[in-house]
Amino acid sequence: MSSEALYDKVADSAVKLGEGLGSTRARILAVDDNIQNVELLDGLLSSRGYEVVKAYNGMEALQKLEEGNIDVVLLDVLMPKMDGYETCRRIKSRPETRLLPVIMLTALDSLEDKVKGIEAGADDFITKPFQKPELLARVKSFERLKGLLDELENAQNVLYSLASALDYNDPYTHGHSKRVSEFSVRLAAHIGLDEAGLDVIRNAGVLHDIGKIATDKGILHKPGALNAIEYKHVKDHPVVGEQICMPLKFARPLLPIIRHHHEKYNGSGYPDGLAGEDIPLGARIMAIVDVYDALTSIRPYRSDIPPEVALEVMKAEAVKGYWDKGLLDAFCEVLRKDGYTISG
């Protein structure tokens, strides 16, 4: 028995076993302007338990993707009107499909063609005419990758939903995390952070108070001063937030900001009493924006105050060493662009 025949037999057995266990069929989008090539892929992949979605040009492929639930794209390069490179670029430019694995099928085998495909966002290449075992192995590998990415996305969505629910269910902090995220990104951009840094700031802003999910609501809504025990519970929330996010790999760059956004520049903050530039830059940014939003919002123990007054309070606190003065000055510049009249 040839190696390919043996491969076919083993694959058929695996499909039957999977069907017996009630496994979900992965959906493969096959894109080629040659009908015979699409039918060849359909026959091969369907016999292995995949559901094949067919498209005969780039625009049709993009339309199929809008319907969702595609796990892997097999994409021909040489197609009329919109070639595979442009189709791949469009797939990778859409937030909802940017992580979707794209395997290019091409008769072109030069280094220049492969570089062009990589620049378009292709995840892999298979040269035509392809070998069945190779194509099936590549599809299986990227199907697993897509499954892992979906699990990661689901975990992220659960975490963000918890953070949103925390804000939404509290009349005093409704929208707080969203505002902190947006203003922190603007401040970070103003001082020159790159896109990767801005993404970290953006996500940390949404999740910075996630630890308050473990803080008693009666403490958070108390109209008077907190006693020592109550204040300790409040001060625990950055560490709790860090612990909640720690198991998720995507959140690891956010952890220093989540943990340290209540540190003060003179070392009098919490939880670790860090001072000066020992406090991560992202945490120093968020500390300023977090306090500004708190001062300009209604709280159980006081009314809100105007932005100009809030900044005067914070400038006085900066003199005491609470905040990074350079960052506070930069934040004032950001707000001036919004039309606020700010002295100093």
Image (cartoon, helix red, strand yellow):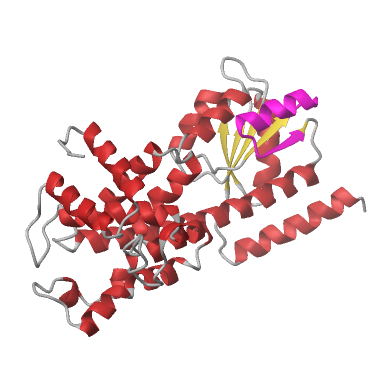
Residue found farthest to the front: 319
Q: Which residue is drawn at 48% across and 36% down?
A: 65
Return the x and y of residue 181 as percentages of the image width and height: 32, 49
Q: In this view, does 334 lie above or below 139?
A: above
Does the magenta segment cover residue 34? no
Residue found farthest to the right: 1
Return the x and y of residue 302 as percentages of the image width and height: 8, 63
Return the x and y of residue 331 as percentages of the image width and height: 29, 43
Quadrant that contains the C terminus: top left
Q: Which image quadrant for residue 17?
A: bottom right
Q: In this view, does 204 lie above or below 220?
A: above
Regarding residue 35, the answer to whether it shows in the image is yes
Q: Which image quadrant for residue 41?
A: top right
Q: Nearer the viewer, residue 219 or 109?
A: 219
Q: Residue at x 16, y 78 (%)?
A: 226
Q: Which of 88 and 304 is in front in this view?
A: 304
Q: Which residue is drawn at 58% across and 30% down?
A: 88
Is 126 on the left-hand or right-hand side of 69? right
Residue found farthest to the top: 81
User: What span is in magenta?
Assistant: 106-126
Does the magenta segment cover residue 111? yes
Regarding residue 155, the answer to whether it shows in the image is no
Q: How many labels does the image show?
A: 0
Residue found farthest to the bottom: 229
Q: Which of 91 and 255 is in front in this view?
A: 255
Is 17 on the left-hand or right-hand side of 281? right
Q: Residue at x 35, y 63 (%)?
A: 266
